[in-house]
Image (cartoon, grey):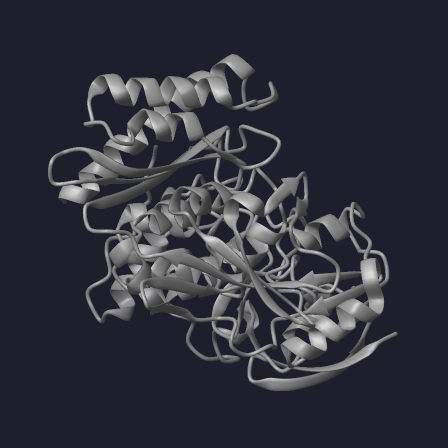
Amino acid sequence: MTKTITVTVNGTAHTAEVEPRLLLVHMIREVLNMTGTHIGCDTSSCGACTILLDGKSIKSCTVLAVQANGKSITTIEGLAPEGGPLHPLQEGFKENHGLHCGFCTPGMIMRCVELLEHNNNPTEEEIRWGISGNLCRCTGYNNIVKAVQWAGAKMRGEETPSTEPEFV
Amino acid sequence: MIAQSFQYESPGTLAEAIALLNEHGDEAKVLSGGHSLIPMMKLRFASPGYLIDINNIPGLSDIKEEAGVVRIGALVRESQLEHSDLLAKHFPIFKDVTKLIADPQVRNMGTLGGNLAHGDAANDHPAVMIALGASVVITNAEGEREVPIDEFFYGFYMTAIQQGEILTEIRIPVPASGTGNAYHKLERKVGDYATAGVAVQITVGEDGIVTSAGIGLTNLNPVPLRASRSEEALIGKPLSDETIALAAQFASEDCSPNSDLRGSEEYKRHLTSVLVKRMIAKAVERING
Protein backbone atom coordinates (compact mmCIF):
# COMPACT_ATOMS: atom_id res chain seq x y z
CA MET A 1 0.00 0.00 0.00
CA THR A 2 1.53 3.31 -1.04
CA LYS A 3 1.53 6.53 0.97
CA THR A 4 1.23 10.06 -0.32
CA ILE A 5 3.92 12.25 1.14
CA THR A 6 4.99 15.84 0.72
CA VAL A 7 8.62 16.74 1.24
CA THR A 8 10.19 20.16 0.73
CA VAL A 9 13.49 19.68 -1.06
CA ASN A 10 15.80 22.68 -1.41
CA GLY A 11 12.84 24.98 -0.91
CA THR A 12 10.45 23.30 -3.36
CA ALA A 13 7.56 21.13 -2.16
CA HIS A 14 7.32 17.73 -3.86
CA THR A 15 4.40 15.35 -3.46
CA ALA A 16 4.91 11.69 -4.30
CA GLU A 17 3.19 8.32 -3.96
CA VAL A 18 5.73 6.02 -2.35
CA GLU A 19 5.97 2.53 -0.97
CA PRO A 20 6.77 2.71 2.76
CA ARG A 21 9.94 0.69 2.17
CA LEU A 22 11.37 3.26 -0.24
CA LEU A 23 14.54 4.72 1.28
CA LEU A 24 14.87 8.49 1.37
CA VAL A 25 18.05 8.37 -0.71
CA HIS A 26 16.22 6.43 -3.44
CA MET A 27 13.38 8.94 -3.42
CA ILE A 28 15.88 11.79 -3.84
CA ARG A 29 17.83 10.09 -6.61
CA GLU A 30 15.20 8.09 -8.46
CA VAL A 31 11.87 9.83 -7.85
CA LEU A 32 13.13 13.41 -7.80
CA ASN A 33 16.05 12.68 -10.16
CA MET A 34 18.53 14.60 -8.03
CA THR A 35 21.70 12.54 -8.27
CA GLY A 36 24.04 14.79 -6.29
CA THR A 37 23.38 12.68 -3.19
CA HIS A 38 25.39 9.47 -3.55
CA ILE A 39 24.90 5.91 -2.34
CA GLY A 40 28.14 4.40 -1.10
CA CYS A 41 27.92 1.57 1.40
CA ASP A 42 24.13 1.48 1.84
CA THR A 43 24.74 0.51 5.51
CA SER A 44 25.02 3.93 7.26
CA SER A 45 28.80 3.60 7.47
CA CYS A 46 30.26 5.79 4.73
CA GLY A 47 28.23 9.01 4.86
CA ALA A 48 28.07 9.54 1.06
CA CYS A 49 24.27 9.86 1.29
CA THR A 50 24.35 12.58 3.97
CA ILE A 51 21.70 15.28 3.59
CA LEU A 52 20.06 17.76 5.95
CA LEU A 53 16.65 16.76 7.31
CA ASP A 54 15.10 19.76 9.06
CA GLY A 55 18.62 21.20 9.27
CA LYS A 56 20.26 18.13 10.81
CA SER A 57 22.74 15.97 8.93
CA ILE A 58 21.50 12.41 8.55
CA LYS A 59 22.32 9.36 6.43
CA SER A 60 19.50 9.09 3.91
CA CYS A 61 20.17 5.38 3.24
CA THR A 62 18.88 4.59 6.72
CA VAL A 63 15.76 6.76 6.74
CA LEU A 64 12.51 5.89 4.99
CA ALA A 65 11.04 8.42 2.58
CA VAL A 66 7.76 8.29 4.56
CA GLN A 67 9.66 9.47 7.66
CA ALA A 68 10.45 12.72 5.82
CA ASN A 69 6.76 13.47 5.22
CA GLY A 70 6.09 17.12 6.08
CA LYS A 71 9.77 17.80 6.62
CA SER A 72 12.35 19.91 4.86
CA ILE A 73 15.42 18.52 3.11
CA THR A 74 18.58 20.17 1.83
CA THR A 75 20.80 18.31 -0.62
CA ILE A 76 24.09 19.35 -2.23
CA GLU A 77 22.06 20.81 -5.13
CA GLY A 78 20.45 23.26 -2.72
CA LEU A 79 23.65 24.80 -1.33
CA ALA A 80 24.36 27.33 -4.08
CA PRO A 81 21.82 29.02 -6.31
CA GLU A 82 21.99 28.06 -10.01
CA GLY A 83 24.70 30.20 -11.61
CA GLY A 84 25.34 32.00 -8.31
CA PRO A 85 28.39 31.92 -6.06
CA LEU A 86 29.44 28.63 -4.49
CA HIS A 87 28.80 27.90 -0.81
CA PRO A 88 32.00 28.58 1.24
CA LEU A 89 32.40 24.82 1.79
CA GLN A 90 32.16 24.11 -1.94
CA GLU A 91 34.71 26.85 -2.58
CA GLY A 92 36.89 25.53 0.25
CA PHE A 93 36.96 22.00 -1.19
CA LYS A 94 37.75 23.41 -4.65
CA GLU A 95 40.52 25.72 -3.43
CA ASN A 96 42.16 23.18 -1.12
CA HIS A 97 42.07 20.10 -3.30
CA GLY A 98 39.59 18.57 -0.84
CA LEU A 99 38.61 15.86 -3.30
CA HIS A 100 40.10 13.42 -5.78
CA CYS A 101 37.31 11.32 -7.21
CA GLY A 102 34.57 13.39 -5.57
CA PHE A 103 32.34 10.51 -4.60
CA CYS A 104 32.33 11.32 -0.88
CA THR A 105 32.25 15.08 -1.42
CA PRO A 106 28.48 15.80 -1.37
CA GLY A 107 28.15 13.88 1.90
CA MET A 108 31.26 15.48 3.40
CA ILE A 109 30.02 18.94 2.53
CA MET A 110 26.47 18.39 3.80
CA ARG A 111 27.85 17.03 7.09
CA CYS A 112 30.16 20.03 7.43
CA VAL A 113 27.33 22.49 6.79
CA GLU A 114 25.84 21.41 10.11
CA LEU A 115 29.27 21.24 11.77
CA LEU A 116 30.09 24.85 10.86
CA GLU A 117 26.61 26.02 11.78
CA HIS A 118 27.25 24.89 15.37
CA ASN A 119 30.85 26.10 15.45
CA ASN A 120 32.36 28.13 12.63
CA ASN A 121 35.87 27.93 14.09
CA PRO A 122 36.42 24.23 14.81
CA THR A 123 39.79 22.79 15.77
CA GLU A 124 41.36 20.10 13.63
CA GLU A 125 40.26 17.52 16.22
CA GLU A 126 36.69 18.80 16.18
CA ILE A 127 36.62 18.57 12.39
CA ARG A 128 38.02 15.04 12.39
CA TRP A 129 35.45 13.93 14.99
CA GLY A 130 32.81 15.88 13.09
CA ILE A 131 33.44 13.91 9.89
CA SER A 132 33.99 10.59 11.66
CA GLY A 133 30.87 9.25 9.95
CA ASN A 134 32.15 10.08 6.46
CA LEU A 135 34.67 7.96 4.61
CA CYS A 136 36.99 9.26 1.91
CA ARG A 137 39.09 6.61 0.21
CA CYS A 138 41.41 8.87 -1.75
CA THR A 139 42.46 12.25 -0.36
CA GLY A 140 43.43 11.00 3.09
CA TYR A 141 41.42 13.70 4.90
CA ASN A 142 44.20 16.29 5.38
CA ASN A 143 42.96 18.50 2.59
CA ILE A 144 39.36 17.94 3.64
CA VAL A 145 40.23 19.30 7.10
CA LYS A 146 41.96 22.27 5.45
CA ALA A 147 38.95 22.85 3.22
CA VAL A 148 36.64 22.99 6.24
CA GLN A 149 39.00 25.35 8.07
CA TRP A 150 39.16 27.51 4.94
CA ALA A 151 35.36 27.61 4.72
CA GLY A 152 35.10 28.48 8.42
CA ALA A 153 37.47 31.43 7.95
CA LYS A 154 35.46 32.62 4.96
CA MET A 155 32.20 32.34 6.91
CA ARG A 156 33.71 34.29 9.81
CA GLY A 157 34.69 37.02 7.35
CA GLU A 158 38.39 36.48 8.02
CA GLU A 159 41.27 36.13 5.62
CA THR A 160 41.29 32.60 4.22
CA PRO A 161 44.39 30.46 4.83
CA SER A 162 46.92 29.69 2.10
CA THR A 163 45.82 26.97 -0.28
CA GLU A 164 49.30 25.67 -1.03
CA PRO A 165 48.86 21.89 -1.32
CA GLU A 166 50.22 19.79 1.50
CA PHE A 167 52.49 16.88 0.56
CA VAL A 168 52.61 14.12 3.13
CA MET B 1 19.16 -3.21 -0.06
CA ILE B 2 15.42 -2.96 0.19
CA ALA B 3 13.31 -4.17 3.10
CA GLN B 4 10.44 -6.57 2.65
CA SER B 5 7.08 -4.80 2.12
CA PHE B 6 5.33 -3.51 5.21
CA GLN B 7 2.55 -1.14 6.15
CA TYR B 8 3.50 2.14 7.75
CA GLU B 9 1.53 4.02 10.39
CA SER B 10 2.53 7.29 12.05
CA PRO B 11 0.09 7.88 14.91
CA GLY B 12 -0.08 11.31 16.51
CA THR B 13 -0.80 10.10 20.04
CA LEU B 14 0.53 7.44 22.37
CA ALA B 15 -2.96 5.95 22.76
CA GLU B 16 -3.28 5.46 18.99
CA ALA B 17 0.18 3.92 18.80
CA ILE B 18 -0.65 1.44 21.58
CA ALA B 19 -3.98 0.61 19.91
CA LEU B 20 -2.13 -0.15 16.65
CA LEU B 21 0.37 -2.34 18.50
CA ASN B 22 -2.46 -4.27 20.13
CA GLU B 23 -4.29 -4.60 16.82
CA HIS B 24 -1.31 -5.96 14.90
CA GLY B 25 0.32 -8.01 17.68
CA ASP B 26 3.74 -9.46 16.96
CA GLU B 27 3.47 -8.39 13.32
CA ALA B 28 4.18 -4.80 14.46
CA LYS B 29 7.44 -3.09 15.39
CA VAL B 30 7.94 0.36 16.89
CA LEU B 31 10.09 2.75 14.84
CA SER B 32 11.97 5.44 16.80
CA GLY B 33 15.39 6.51 15.47
CA GLY B 34 15.42 3.45 13.23
CA HIS B 35 19.19 3.07 13.13
CA SER B 36 19.13 -0.48 14.45
CA LEU B 37 15.77 -1.55 13.02
CA ILE B 38 16.03 -0.20 9.47
CA PRO B 39 19.46 -1.80 8.83
CA MET B 40 18.03 -5.11 10.13
CA MET B 41 15.01 -4.74 7.83
CA LYS B 42 17.24 -3.95 4.85
CA LEU B 43 19.24 -7.12 5.57
CA ARG B 44 15.90 -8.92 6.07
CA PHE B 45 16.91 -10.08 9.53
CA ALA B 46 13.65 -8.38 10.56
CA SER B 47 10.52 -8.27 8.41
CA PRO B 48 7.70 -6.69 10.41
CA GLY B 49 4.36 -6.44 8.65
CA TYR B 50 3.58 -3.12 10.31
CA LEU B 51 5.90 -0.31 11.29
CA ILE B 52 4.48 2.00 13.94
CA ASP B 53 6.46 5.25 13.72
CA ILE B 54 6.31 7.03 17.10
CA ASN B 55 8.29 10.08 15.95
CA ASN B 56 5.18 12.23 15.52
CA ILE B 57 3.97 11.67 19.08
CA PRO B 58 4.52 14.87 21.08
CA GLY B 59 5.95 14.88 24.61
CA LEU B 60 8.58 12.17 24.22
CA SER B 61 11.55 14.40 23.37
CA ASP B 62 12.25 16.32 26.58
CA ILE B 63 14.97 16.15 29.23
CA LYS B 64 13.64 17.42 32.59
CA GLU B 65 14.64 17.38 36.23
CA GLU B 66 11.82 16.93 38.72
CA ALA B 67 12.00 16.09 42.43
CA GLY B 68 15.48 14.67 42.32
CA VAL B 69 14.92 12.62 39.17
CA VAL B 70 16.12 13.34 35.65
CA ARG B 71 13.46 12.26 33.16
CA ILE B 72 14.49 11.62 29.57
CA GLY B 73 11.82 11.09 26.93
CA ALA B 74 12.19 7.94 24.85
CA LEU B 75 12.63 9.96 21.63
CA VAL B 76 15.50 12.10 22.92
CA ARG B 77 18.24 11.78 20.28
CA GLU B 78 21.83 10.91 21.06
CA SER B 79 22.85 14.38 19.85
CA GLN B 80 20.46 15.94 22.41
CA LEU B 81 22.07 13.88 25.19
CA GLU B 82 25.48 14.95 23.92
CA HIS B 83 24.72 18.68 24.15
CA SER B 84 22.35 18.84 27.16
CA ASP B 85 23.55 21.27 29.85
CA LEU B 86 21.20 19.68 32.39
CA LEU B 87 22.76 16.25 31.84
CA ALA B 88 26.30 17.66 31.77
CA LYS B 89 25.75 19.07 35.27
CA HIS B 90 25.04 15.71 36.95
CA PHE B 91 26.18 13.20 34.38
CA PRO B 92 29.35 13.98 32.40
CA ILE B 93 29.15 10.26 31.54
CA PHE B 94 26.63 11.14 28.79
CA LYS B 95 29.27 13.12 26.91
CA ASP B 96 31.64 10.14 27.24
CA VAL B 97 29.15 7.64 25.91
CA THR B 98 27.45 9.62 23.14
CA LYS B 99 30.76 10.58 21.56
CA LEU B 100 31.49 6.86 21.20
CA ILE B 101 28.09 5.87 19.77
CA ALA B 102 28.23 5.56 15.98
CA ASP B 103 28.86 8.95 14.34
CA PRO B 104 27.32 12.45 14.28
CA GLN B 105 24.71 11.69 11.59
CA VAL B 106 23.55 8.52 13.31
CA ARG B 107 23.41 10.41 16.63
CA ASN B 108 21.06 12.93 15.02
CA MET B 109 18.55 10.09 14.54
CA GLY B 110 19.28 7.43 17.16
CA THR B 111 17.37 7.66 20.44
CA LEU B 112 18.09 6.63 24.03
CA GLY B 113 14.76 4.78 24.17
CA GLY B 114 15.52 2.81 21.02
CA ASN B 115 19.04 2.00 22.17
CA LEU B 116 17.59 0.36 25.31
CA ALA B 117 14.45 -1.18 23.77
CA HIS B 118 16.60 -2.92 21.14
CA GLY B 119 17.85 -5.13 23.98
CA ASP B 120 21.37 -5.59 22.64
CA ALA B 121 24.17 -6.05 25.20
CA ALA B 122 26.55 -4.62 22.60
CA ASN B 123 24.80 -1.23 22.79
CA ASP B 124 26.42 1.31 25.08
CA HIS B 125 23.52 2.83 27.02
CA PRO B 126 22.49 -0.31 28.91
CA ALA B 127 25.78 -0.35 30.86
CA VAL B 128 25.47 3.37 31.55
CA MET B 129 21.90 2.97 32.81
CA ILE B 130 23.04 0.13 35.09
CA ALA B 131 25.81 2.31 36.55
CA LEU B 132 23.41 5.23 37.09
CA GLY B 133 20.67 3.08 38.66
CA ALA B 134 18.09 4.15 36.06
CA SER B 135 14.58 2.86 35.56
CA VAL B 136 12.50 2.60 32.43
CA VAL B 137 8.86 3.64 32.05
CA ILE B 138 6.77 1.29 29.92
CA THR B 139 3.32 2.41 28.78
CA ASN B 140 0.41 0.21 27.70
CA ALA B 141 -3.36 0.58 27.32
CA GLU B 142 -3.88 0.32 31.10
CA GLY B 143 -1.32 2.95 32.06
CA GLU B 144 2.37 2.94 32.81
CA ARG B 145 4.77 0.96 34.95
CA GLU B 146 8.30 1.72 36.05
CA VAL B 147 10.81 -1.08 35.65
CA PRO B 148 14.24 -0.93 37.33
CA ILE B 149 17.01 -1.36 34.78
CA ASP B 150 18.13 -4.59 36.51
CA GLU B 151 14.76 -6.15 35.64
CA PHE B 152 14.60 -4.78 32.08
CA PHE B 153 16.97 -6.92 30.00
CA TYR B 154 15.83 -10.54 29.60
CA GLY B 155 18.10 -11.89 26.88
CA PHE B 156 19.36 -11.28 23.37
CA TYR B 157 16.95 -8.71 21.86
CA MET B 158 14.54 -9.48 24.71
CA THR B 159 13.38 -6.95 27.27
CA ALA B 160 10.55 -6.41 29.75
CA ILE B 161 8.55 -4.67 27.00
CA GLN B 162 5.55 -6.85 26.15
CA GLN B 163 3.15 -6.84 23.23
CA GLY B 164 1.11 -3.63 23.11
CA GLU B 165 3.69 -1.70 25.12
CA ILE B 166 6.04 1.17 24.36
CA LEU B 167 9.09 2.38 26.27
CA THR B 168 8.21 6.04 26.91
CA GLU B 169 10.69 7.45 29.43
CA ILE B 170 13.96 6.84 31.22
CA ARG B 171 14.30 8.00 34.84
CA ILE B 172 17.65 8.55 36.52
CA PRO B 173 18.03 9.59 40.16
CA VAL B 174 20.06 12.77 40.62
CA PRO B 175 23.16 11.57 42.49
CA ALA B 176 24.20 12.78 45.93
CA SER B 177 27.02 15.28 46.21
CA GLY B 178 30.40 13.60 46.13
CA THR B 179 29.42 11.56 43.05
CA GLY B 180 31.32 11.13 39.81
CA ASN B 181 30.66 9.01 36.71
CA ALA B 182 32.53 7.99 33.57
CA TYR B 183 32.30 5.65 30.57
CA HIS B 184 34.73 4.35 28.02
CA LYS B 185 34.70 1.65 25.43
CA LEU B 186 37.50 0.39 23.30
CA GLU B 187 36.36 0.34 19.68
CA ARG B 188 38.39 -0.67 16.65
CA LYS B 189 37.01 2.20 14.61
CA VAL B 190 34.21 4.77 14.74
CA GLY B 191 30.84 3.05 14.63
CA ASP B 192 32.05 -0.34 15.83
CA TYR B 193 30.60 -2.19 18.76
CA ALA B 194 32.70 -2.22 21.92
CA THR B 195 35.54 -4.67 22.25
CA ALA B 196 34.86 -3.93 25.91
CA GLY B 197 33.08 -1.03 27.60
CA VAL B 198 32.77 0.02 31.24
CA ALA B 199 30.45 2.54 32.94
CA VAL B 200 31.09 3.64 36.51
CA GLN B 201 29.25 5.87 38.96
CA ILE B 202 30.74 6.24 42.43
CA THR B 203 29.88 8.31 45.51
CA VAL B 204 32.54 9.00 48.12
CA GLY B 205 31.70 10.50 51.52
CA GLU B 206 33.68 13.30 53.14
CA ASP B 207 35.46 10.70 55.24
CA GLY B 208 36.75 9.07 52.05
CA ILE B 209 34.49 6.02 52.36
CA VAL B 210 32.64 4.86 49.24
CA THR B 211 28.90 5.06 49.94
CA SER B 212 27.61 3.84 46.58
CA ALA B 213 29.00 2.34 43.40
CA GLY B 214 27.41 1.33 40.10
CA ILE B 215 29.39 -0.53 37.45
CA GLY B 216 27.92 -1.67 34.12
CA LEU B 217 29.68 -3.62 31.36
CA THR B 218 29.14 -3.36 27.58
CA ASN B 219 29.40 -6.29 25.15
CA LEU B 220 31.05 -8.57 27.67
CA ASN B 221 28.06 -10.78 28.45
CA PRO B 222 24.94 -12.13 26.66
CA VAL B 223 22.87 -9.53 28.55
CA PRO B 224 24.04 -6.15 29.84
CA LEU B 225 25.88 -6.95 33.07
CA ARG B 226 26.03 -5.28 36.46
CA ALA B 227 29.40 -6.02 38.04
CA SER B 228 27.85 -6.64 41.48
CA ARG B 229 30.87 -8.16 43.19
CA SER B 230 32.96 -5.21 42.00
CA GLU B 231 30.46 -2.76 43.48
CA GLU B 232 30.42 -4.64 46.78
CA ALA B 233 34.22 -4.59 46.86
CA LEU B 234 34.11 -0.79 46.90
CA ILE B 235 31.09 0.10 49.04
CA GLY B 236 31.83 0.82 52.70
CA LYS B 237 35.57 0.93 52.12
CA PRO B 238 38.04 3.73 51.57
CA LEU B 239 39.19 4.01 47.97
CA SER B 240 42.60 2.42 47.75
CA ASP B 241 44.69 0.77 45.06
CA GLU B 242 43.81 -2.57 46.67
CA THR B 243 40.01 -2.14 46.63
CA ILE B 244 40.11 -0.78 43.08
CA ALA B 245 42.28 -3.69 41.95
CA LEU B 246 39.85 -6.12 43.58
CA ALA B 247 36.86 -4.47 41.85
CA ALA B 248 38.68 -4.71 38.53
CA GLN B 249 39.57 -8.36 39.10
CA PHE B 250 35.97 -9.28 40.01
CA ALA B 251 34.57 -7.61 36.88
CA SER B 252 37.03 -9.43 34.65
CA GLU B 253 36.09 -12.74 36.32
CA ASP B 254 32.32 -12.25 36.37
CA CYS B 255 31.77 -11.24 32.73
CA SER B 256 31.44 -13.80 29.90
CA PRO B 257 32.95 -12.37 26.74
CA ASN B 258 33.21 -14.34 23.51
CA SER B 259 36.35 -14.61 21.45
CA ASP B 260 35.67 -12.94 18.11
CA LEU B 261 37.24 -10.62 15.55
CA ARG B 262 37.54 -7.92 18.22
CA GLY B 263 39.74 -10.05 20.42
CA SER B 264 40.11 -13.23 22.43
CA GLU B 265 38.17 -13.90 25.60
CA GLU B 266 41.38 -13.54 27.60
CA TYR B 267 42.16 -10.18 26.02
CA LYS B 268 38.64 -8.90 26.72
CA ARG B 269 38.84 -9.97 30.38
CA HIS B 270 42.15 -8.15 30.70
CA LEU B 271 40.66 -5.09 29.00
CA THR B 272 37.71 -5.17 31.41
CA SER B 273 40.04 -5.04 34.36
CA VAL B 274 42.00 -2.12 32.87
CA LEU B 275 38.87 -0.16 31.98
CA VAL B 276 37.26 -0.67 35.41
CA LYS B 277 40.37 0.78 37.07
CA ARG B 278 40.52 3.70 34.64
CA MET B 279 36.84 4.53 34.86
CA ILE B 280 36.87 4.48 38.67
CA ALA B 281 39.84 6.86 38.57
CA LYS B 282 38.11 9.12 36.05
CA ALA B 283 34.83 9.15 37.99
CA VAL B 284 36.65 10.00 41.23
CA GLU B 285 38.62 12.74 39.48
CA ARG B 286 35.32 14.29 38.45
CA ILE B 287 34.08 14.38 42.06
CA ASN B 288 36.99 16.57 42.94
CA GLY B 289 37.09 18.52 39.71
Q: In this view, does A26 lie above or below A104?
A: below
Closer to us: A72 or B227: B227
Quarter holding residue B22? bottom right
Q: Is residue B254 above or below residue B36?
A: above
Residue farthest along the front direction in this orientation = B236
* Picture residue at 58% right of the left edge, 63% below the top: B145
Residue farthest along the top direction in this orientation = B266
Query: What percent of the width, then of the height, locates residue A51?
Result: 55, 65
Query: What percent of the width, then of the height, locates residue B278?
Result: 29, 28
Closer to us: A50 or A5: A5
Residue A33 visible in image: no
* Picture residue at 23% right of the left edge, 56% below the top: A161
* Picture residue at 34% right of the left edge, 35% below the top: A167
Residue A64 located left or right of residue B145: right
Closer to us: A126 or B60: B60
Q: Which image quarter is the C terminus of chain B in?
A: top left
Residue B255 located left or right of residue A166: right
Query: What percent of the width, then of the height, locates residue B235?
Result: 29, 32
Query: What percent of the width, then of the height, locates residue A96?
Result: 36, 52
Residue farthest along the left direction in this orientation = B207
Residue B233 visible in image: yes
Quarter holding residue B288? top left
